[in-house]
Image (cartoon, grey):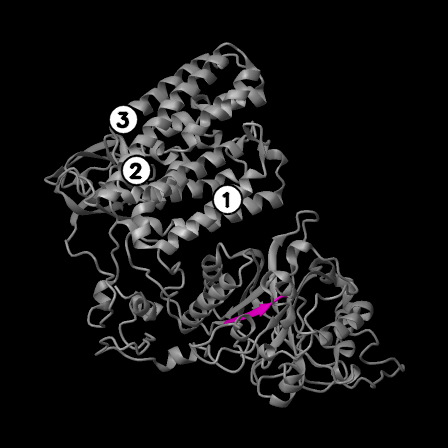
Amino acid sequence: MEPASAARVSRRRLLGGVAGLGLINAAGIGLAGCATQSASAAQDTVPFYGAHQAGITTDIQDRLAFAAFDVTTTRREDLQALLKTWTAAAEAMTRGAMVPGDSHANEMPPADTGEAVGLSPARLTITVGFGPSLFDGRFGLAPRRPAALTELPALPHETLDPARCGGDIGIQACANDPQVAFHAVRNLARLGRGTVVTRWTQLGFGRTSSTGATQETPRNLMGFKDGTRNIRSDDAAALDKHVWVGTEAGQDWMRGGSYLVARRIRMFVETWDRDRLSDQEAVFGRAKYTGAPLSGKTESDNPDFTAKTADGQLTIPEDAHIRLAAFENNNGLRILRRGYSFTDGTDARTGTLDAGLFFISFQKDPAQFITLQRKLGTQDALNEYILHVGSALFACPQGVPDASRYWGHALVEG
Amino acid sequence: MLPRLITERQSLRASSIMGSFDRGIAAPILICAAAVLAGCGRSDTAAPATQPATEVKVALSEAGCEPQPASVPAGPVRFMITNSGASHVTEVELLRDGKIVGEKEGVKPGSSGDLVLRLEGGGAYSVHCAGGARNDWPLAVTGGGEGPGTGPANATLAAATQGYHDYVVTEVDQLVTSTKQFTDAVRAGDMEKAKQLYPVARVHYESIEPVAESFGDLDPEIDARIDDVDNPADWTGFHRIEKALWQDQTLAGIGPLADKLDADVATLKSKVATETYQPAQLGNGAGELLNEVSTTKVTGEEDRYSHTDLWDLAANVDGARKCFELLKPALEAKDPALVRQLEARFADVAGSLSKYRQGDGYVDYSTVTPDQRRQLANAVNALAEPMSQVAGRVV
């Protein structure tokens, strides 16, 4: 038995992709007659290795599984071992392979939990980030904490539930298949048992933004397109300016990384649904169905924030969401949004839907988000219908270049 | 009573056909898509079915579940279970000496399912289906020995299994004594004394629970919770008396239940006297004890009236620890890193539990906050994960 090669058998092949479906790693085992990676498998796979982590500028997938973990060990070796194990497992899963290890020995629990067997890799990406709390005294990492990585300050219009906040390590798994995303988080949690405990998790059932150059803007649960002017993956200049950490961090391990802000934003959808259409559009500053700014005709039209109606009022109102969030009105400040709609059943206290936006943004400095939220949290017309209830900040390190390195290598080694 | 009432026991069976304490006559066979893989040079050995399974057809009907053929040679047997329209008969159990060897649930009308077991031990088995006009159908297994467990070749493992036998016998001896002290108080109508002795008596049951659960009806008779019984009037055992003591606050009419509890633990004593074990059963049994803790004990379901859950929980952990200690010499040779990891995590669990010690026992579980319970569950889950690797390492 050679566990490593077992893991290299793709999930599809295992369940019966007789021809052409399998993603077989060239493991040097006798593969005569077996197809190598097919075109469709390639399209379903996002490369794991690279200068940046996948799952940031990657064309945003349809589904999210997010988990925040707390580390329970105090030994740095345990943390290193965890990150090595996680990296190998994440790399395998994003290829569509099973978690490394033996999944076929009758007397052992399978190394992989199995629910993704037979499924496409579904463009799975797994992105890791480290919370400010990881840099306390436990692992001797305090000297490596970038100045930018401190807990988010109290922000306006938030009522945070501690059970949905923070975490030593964050894992964002995105895929076009919810089961594939769930499988990734579940298996990492399992591999980490004894070293980490799950602090909170969040599933997202639908993307609310676009990051790809050609991706259409989806609608949020309020029925609006909110994310039209997101930074797109082909805009290298904007990414370097706003998203990727460069030399300014003062920490080599973050160069090429980015800061992830997660906010669980509850939407009061019942009250929103009772608001008249014209007011809904005034709140966002966009037409509900076309997505066009109220000053324009099509979604892609740039908003004209000076435009006025016949009676002299601002066409896009003073407190409209897009006016307050626009880079033109924030000294050029931009963030990369990558959020997902969620619902977690009903609010037991009120009987209303517990639903909203699991906001995720990437930026080279958390200050970008803080600046925007200080403004939105006090002025945005949308505040009547939303409340921030969960919050976390994670420093997502640079990408893993190849199999000789692992997540956070430069942070926890040496 | 039909042997299908205890959720605890069902989870035992579902989770560990290999490891349930059933004398090692059943081992699962992983039937995988070997045909698909043929020719693709997978270097792992996912297709262990070198010995073809004997096929037995079991057609569920309102009449029952007659196996065809009714006699098979020892070795792998594939039960092909079909249900063409029997809505009351949807599950099958294979029993030997009243103990469950394997089962298949949820075969609804119009569906089918396979149950693959390795039947090494020759002799009389029965195919059991609740709800049929006739519940029990004989199945003879010819040839075979006393099972793969005529004794482990390895002396270290032999010492482990013998040591476990001795441990179980000792625990059940103590169970008989401690239960008698408890039931005497119940019969005497001494509520306070009975309340004091209730958790003390149970400790010796909880430490060997998977063994007791392998004896079909016995565990439900002794340890069923109210939600495990179809008819509350048929409810017997520790938890029935627990409810009388803490919730009903009267022992009127409980005397016969106390007598029956004594009789049931005496039966358990006679059964474990001749029981033998396989090394894998120790590993899997330990895992089952920890799974018990993390799913039903930590939630406070087990002792919902008395809130003495921590006594049970600690006894479960002790039972798991015993299995581990016995297997340690063998495990040390195979995987010393796993031994060290388990040692450390047992110590973590012990540390977590020690916070709740009070006198000779533990604090009332209702005073343990949700956060504290979650912390306990985290520690136990962290232990259960490497424990799940043990059985595979020692066989």
Q: Residues within 10 Å of mark 3 (few under 14, many from 20)?
A: some
Tell me how far mark 2 sits from mark 1, CA to CA.
25 Å
Locate residue B38: give its quadrant.
Answer: bottom left
Q: Nearer the viewer, residue B297 or B126?
A: B297
Q: Is residue B111 left or right of residue A150?
A: left
Residue B105 can be seen in this image: no
* Chain letter for the residue marked with disc 2 in the picture: B
**Chain-order first, disc 2 or disc 1:** 2
Disc 3 is placed on an element classified as helix
Say if labels 2 and 1 share a chain: yes
**Chain-order first, disc 3 or disc 2:** 2
Instruction: Report the residue at 27% width, 26% height from top.
Output: B273
Name the residue type under label 1.
Val
Q: Nearer the viewer, residue A365 or A251?
A: A251
Q: What residue did someone put label 2 on? A: B21
Q: Is residue A290 above or below residue B172?
A: below
Tell me how far mark 3 sits from mark 1, CA to CA.
31 Å
Q: Is residue B384 above or below residue A253?
A: above
Q: Is residue A350 above or below residue A279?
A: above
Q: What residue did someone put label 3 on? A: B273
Q: Nearer the viewer, residue B338 or A371?
A: B338
Magenta span includes B88: no
What range of the chain is rendered magenta?
A: A126-131
**Numbered tag placed on residue B328 in the rendering:** none
**Numbered tag placed on residue B349 in the rendering:** 1
Name the residue type under label 2.
Phe
Instruction: Report the residue at 51% width, 57% height from top.
Output: A195
Front disc: 3 or 2: 3
